[in-house]
């Protein structure tokens, strides 16, 4: 199956600073890359996603970039706020012969200090 | 309705018990997933159903038995579990093909404790 690597495992920033989380994937057939935010005791919630035919996508303070050639994608959060503190997971999605497969990176624990 | 509903929310079971986890969605999604999540770890893929057929089994022990009786329901039957199987079990659903925006929606999970 797909192998997704995510860095860093922990990230601490000052409120207002930017945060960047990076992921790489192994299977060039992966074509959809969601990012999930998971707060303690809660389910993963999608915050942004990008498809393989797009290089960059932005939604307010959150942006994702994708480099298909290098097989890596990144999450950028600007003007961080304490409520951004959570665990963030990247994922890679592949569909082969109508069969879906979605694998997660190991996660990044983001702490935003007020 | 973008809801994936899992029941029960919490489950405590003995190692000789048989129990089932249930997952339901009414978004017309034809892909449904089971993930296992241990504390401070990512969701780990266990099973995927596409069009009600098992398409991925990540070498999960046979004490976990999935079932997809129809396009809205997904079950996970549990039997003779071990304490190390204690975890949060997450169900998710999505469209099968990535056309337009495809989002996997997660249920709130079942927190399982094996004693």
Image (cartoon, rainbow, N blue to C red):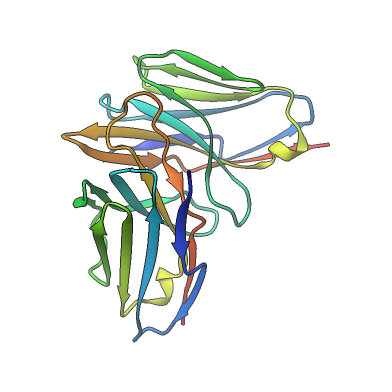
User: B10 left or right of B59?
Assistant: right
Q: Quadrant of residue A94?
A: top left
Q: Looking at the picture, does residue B112 appear above or below residue A23? A: below
A110 lies left or right of B96: right
Residue under the point 44% across and 18% down: A66
Q: Which quadrant holds residue B102?
A: top left
In the picture as drawn, the residue positioned furthest to the left comes out as A97
- The residue positioned farthest toward the right in the image shown: A114
Q: Quadrant of the C terminus of chain A?
A: top right
Q: Toward the viewer: B67 or A10?
A: B67
Residue B68 position, x and y percent, is: 25, 59
Q: Is residue B68 above or below residue A37?
A: below
Q: Nearer the viewer, residue A10 or B21?
A: B21
Instruction: Please determine whether, in this image, residue A69 is positioned above or below residue B48.
Output: above
Q: Position of residue B30 (x, y in %)?
A: 28, 44
Residue in the picture at 41% in, 85% down? B14
Q: Which quadrant, please, contains the N terminus of chain A?
A: top left
Q: Residue at x 39, y 49 (%)?
A: B26
**Residue A19 point in image, percent of width and height:** 65, 27
Tag count:
0
Position of residue A59 measured from the top left corner of the image (x, y, whole percent): 59, 21
Look at 78% across and 31% down and name the residue there. Answer: A14
**Does B67 appear above or below B28?**
below
Relative to A85, is A15 on the left or the right? right
**Is B70 positioned to the left or the right of B12 in the image?**
left
């Amino acid at each position: 199956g797909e192998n997704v690597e995510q860095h860093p495992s922990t990230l601490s920033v000052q409120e207002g600073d930017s945060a960047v989380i990076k992921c790489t994937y192994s299977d060039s057939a992966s074509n959809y890359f969601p990012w999930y935010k998971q707060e303690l005791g809660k389910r993963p919630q999608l915050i942004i996603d990008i498809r393989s035919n797009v290089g960059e996508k932005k939604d307010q303070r959150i942006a994702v970039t994708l480099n298909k050639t290098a097989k890596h994608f990144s999450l950028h959060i600007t003007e961080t706020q304490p409520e951004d503190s959570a665990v963030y997971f990247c994922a890679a999605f592949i569909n082969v012969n109508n069969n879906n497969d979605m694998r997660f990176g190991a996660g990044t624990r983001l702490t935003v200090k007020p | 309705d973008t809801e994936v509903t899992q029941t029960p929310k919490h489950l405590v079971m003995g190692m000789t018990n048989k129990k089932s986890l249930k997952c339901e969605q009414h978004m017309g999604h034809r892909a449904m997933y089971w993930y296992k999540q241990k504390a401070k770890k990512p969701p780990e893929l266990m099973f995927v159903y596409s069009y009600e057929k098992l398409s991925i089994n990540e070498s999960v022990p046979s004490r976990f038995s999935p079932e997809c009786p129809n396009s809205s329901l997904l079950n996970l039957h549990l039997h003779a579990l071990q304490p190390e199987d204690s975890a949060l079990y997450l169900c998710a659903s999505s469209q099968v093909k990535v056309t337009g925006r495809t989002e996997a929606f997660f249920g709130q999970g079942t927190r399982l404790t094996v004693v």
